[in-house]
Image (spheres, helix red, strand yellow):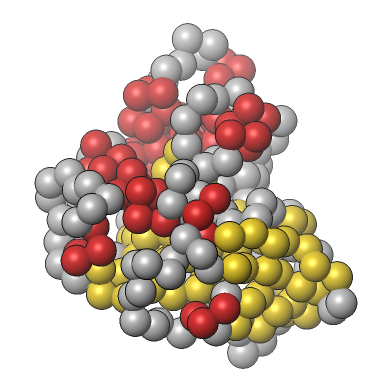
Amino acid sequence: MSDWPQKFLHAYSERHHYDSVTAAHDELTLDDAYDIQHQFVALRKEAISGYKAALTAPAAQQAMGINTPIIGALFAAGEFATTQAIVPNGPALLETELGYRVNDAISAPVNADDVARLLHCCMPMIELASPNLASKPNGLDLIATNSASYGYICGVEGDLDANALDALQVSLRQGDEIKLQGVGAEVLGGQLHALAWLINQTLARGYQIEAGHLFMSGSIGGMCAAAPGDYVAEFGALGNIEFSIGKA
């Protein structure tokens, strides 16, 4: 399996779909998939801006044939501005999430009770996820190819009110149609629990956490196709994100 990170790098560079590693290796384990992911991320030689959680909802895990949330790396080059329409390279999905920046480097596991003191700020975020797989996705293939990490939009950084995060009402509208709707507490039993899990998994999978790194705790309200049009994401006291998806 040592050649799969290079295969994925070639596909990424040429804008091809990723082949399924599980189709070729049905004995692939969770650890194997993360080893491939880690090597693939390193081969890209791009600045890592942080990390994301994915498949945080039980229904999403079931659909992908896995029984755990997963993580992936975010790249600085994946941050999109809202000053012009975003045109994804291929089919993408939109997710409303909360993002957090850490004050300092983190090298030891954390727990939900003390994670808030490690944070510089909280912000509203939009993720643009793109599995980019040649065949029907499954959890291990997603992990190996960096968990559908493609791009993201950051809202305005705000003060962290840890007590209000779980009660935060979040929605995404395209015109008059509500595409997504949810509440902060739905992600892994609560935002700080989700964030602690993500930080600990990031360390366990061999990544380094540096001061200023960004963490996206997981989808609030599910996901929808990134169809062309104008969108407004509302995050209560944290403010709104307005953005447009253009036609390819």
Q: Residue at x 65, y 75 (%)?
A: 233
Residue 26 left/right relative to 137: left
- Quarter of the figure with the N terminus: top left
Q: Residue at x 46, y 84 (%)?
A: 156
Q: Residue 69 placed where, x, y %?
A: 47, 37
Q: Residue at x 41, y 23 (%)?
A: 30
Residue ranking furthest to the top: 27
Q: Is residue 146 visible?
A: no
Q: Residue 169 placed where, x, y %?
A: 60, 68
The residue lying toward the viewer, choosing from 83 and 100, is 100
Location of residue 26 (image quadrant): top right
Residue 133 left/right relative to 239: right
Location of residue 55 (image quadrant): top right
Q: Is residue 123 visible?
A: yes
Residue 219 left/right relative to 206: right
Residue 1 left/right relative to 233: left
